[in-house]
């Protein structure tokens, strides 16, 4: 019902309204670091964000009779104001605003994140794309890697050619976040799983928690307890004695520990990309001594993760990870809905253009999430003030609030020729719809 009460809105109006709340468009500053004297700069910026995020180009947003929306004006703003640094600064404003919405605390504290890739075909000739018949057919394409926290905010992103294993890039994405607290736990699908990745994540203070499709094939590892290697007795792991038959080689970890610390320091200070050591530690399929040490160290954390997933008494851990991965998939559906032009194909030939366009898409998705979250919070306040109860006699409970999602899009119009003018007062929210008015939208979203 809450989704059905969301007001209908056009995407440009939504962006203008979010700017009224947050001022996120003020983060777009001139390349030469000079103040602008342009009138209605934010109107031009919204037009550019819509053209990039919706993948429709300039024609639908150009209005020759409006100075802020002429082709020359948009080209000038695009060349001088829109770049990776300003996208990141604007996104940081939205992330902080999302954390401040009252309803968001029911979804999480921002310490759990998921990372996954969204694939895009690139039909033009470019070196920054790779083949993958499964995703791109006879074409080549790119992967847009996203980090999303449990407050439903996209906190980091990067573009990689083709469809490489996510494990080679996840850390690069997490180390260079736009804003928000550093996640303590990171979940993803099984494509990112390896003992070495577990080890590096653990060294950097993350709990790596991928989803396993083949739990029955996973190995449980054990370390020597006091007495195992000295002959003074036999270590006992109790019920796990028959499961954890593989032993971790602690000696390999001790021998390489100083170099492992150096690698971790180089990663957190951005001296090297995580992609490079991960690739070098397993060159040719044969891990180096340092790579084997990271793998041995990672088996400790991997076993703890497996035990938490298989806990027969408390399934909170497993349900939390599953819910976060569902959030990631829903956010990707919203991104597909917005990036509808050109068949959803990215036609930028250069890496910088691809990164700028997909950064604009991520920014717009975050703006939609913030708008939805703000209105959902207002709807909950409205229902509680009216002492509303359902036909089953159940009111608005904290459990129901925690299950709400700001990723619905049935009320959002991303199509057509766009009217980029404010349509609401700068103060207050739009009137909420009655549940009966939004019934058809709710069915469409289902």
Image (cartoon, helix red, strand yellow):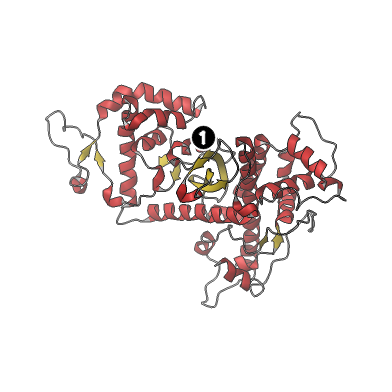
Is 268 drawn above or below residue 46 in the view shown? above
* x and y, in percent, of residue 438 in the image: 64, 71
Is 392 drawn above or below residue 278 in the view shown? below
Q: How many dots with numbers?
A: 1
Viewport quadrant of the C terminus: bottom right
Viewport quadrant of the N terminus: bottom right
Residue 370 visible in this rendered orientation of the protein: no
| 263 lies left or right of 219 | right
* x and y, in percent, of residue 94 in the image: 64, 46
Q: Callout 1: few (<14), some (14-19), or many (20+) C-alpha neighbours within 10 Å?
A: some
Residue at 52% of width from left, 27% of height from top? 270
* x and y, in percent, of residue 341 in the image: 65, 53
Please, what secondary structure does the residue beneath circle 1 have? Answer: helix
Q: Label 1, on which residue?
A: 175
| 41 lies left or right of 198 | right
* x and y, in percent, of residue 211 in the image: 39, 49
Residue at 30% of width from left, 43% of height from top? 303
Q: Nearer the viewer, residue 127 or 183?
A: 127
- Which residue reaches farthest bottom? 391
| 41 lies left or right of 286 | right
Q: Nearer the viewer, residue 348 or 429?
A: 348
Q: Nearer the viewer, residue 50 or 442?
A: 50
Residue 321 visible in this rendered orientation of the protein: yes
């Amino acid at each position: 019902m809450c989704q059905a009460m969301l007001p209908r809105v056009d995407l440009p109006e939504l962006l203008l309204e979010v700017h009224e709340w947050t001022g996120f468009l003020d983060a777009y500053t001139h390349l030469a670091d000079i103040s602008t004297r342009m009138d209605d700069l934010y109107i031009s910026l919204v037009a550019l964000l819509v053209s990039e995020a919706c993948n429709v180009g300039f024609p639908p947003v150009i209005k020759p009779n409006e100075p802020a929306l002429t082709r020359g004006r948009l080209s000038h703003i695009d060349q001088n104001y829109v770049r990776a640094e300003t996208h990141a600064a604007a996104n940081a404003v939205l992330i902080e605003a999302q954390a401040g919405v009252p309803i968001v605390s029911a979804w999480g504290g921002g310490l759990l994140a998921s990372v996954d890739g969204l694939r895009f075909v690139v039909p033009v000739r470019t070196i920054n794309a790779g083949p993958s018949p499964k995703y791109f057919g006879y074409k080549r394409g790119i992967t847009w890697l996203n980090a999303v926290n449990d407050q439903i905010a996209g906190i980091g992103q990067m573009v990689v050619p083709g469809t490489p294993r996510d494990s080679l890039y996840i850390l690069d994405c997490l180390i260079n976040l736009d804003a928000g607290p550093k996640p303590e736990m990171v979940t993803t699908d099984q494509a990112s799983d390896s003992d070495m990745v577990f080890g590096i994540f653990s060294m950097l203070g993350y709990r790596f928690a991928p989803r396993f499709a083949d739990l029955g094939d996973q190995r449980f590892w054990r370390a020597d307890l006091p007495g195992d290697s000295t002959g003074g007795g036999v270590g006992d792991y109790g019920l796990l004695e028959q499961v954890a038959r593989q032993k971790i080689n602690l000696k390999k970890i001790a021998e390489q520990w100083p170099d492992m610390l150096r690698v971790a320091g180089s990663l957190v200070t951005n001296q090297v990309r995580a992609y490079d050591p991960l690739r070098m530690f397993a060159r040719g399929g044969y891990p180096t001594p340092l790579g084997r040490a990271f793998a041995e160290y990672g088996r400790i954390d991997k076993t703890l993760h497996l035990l938490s997933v298989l806990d027969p008494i408390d399934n909170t851990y497993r349900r939390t990870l599953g819910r976060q991965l569902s959030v990631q998939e829903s956010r990707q559906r919203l991104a597909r809905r917005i990036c509808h032009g050109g068949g959803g194909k990215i036609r930028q030939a250069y890496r910088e253009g691809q990164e700028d366009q997909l950064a604009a898409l991520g920014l717009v998705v975050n703006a939609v999430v913030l708008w939805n979250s703000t209105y959902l919070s207002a709807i909950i306040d409205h229902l509680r003030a009216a002492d509303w109860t359902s036909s089953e006699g159940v009111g608005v409970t904290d459990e129901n609030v925690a299950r709400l999602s700001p990723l619905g899009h049935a009320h959002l119009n991303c199509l057509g020729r766009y009217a980029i003018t404010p349509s609401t007062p700068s103060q207050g929210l739009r009137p909420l719809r009655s549940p009966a008015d939004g019934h058809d939208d709710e069915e469409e979203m289902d």
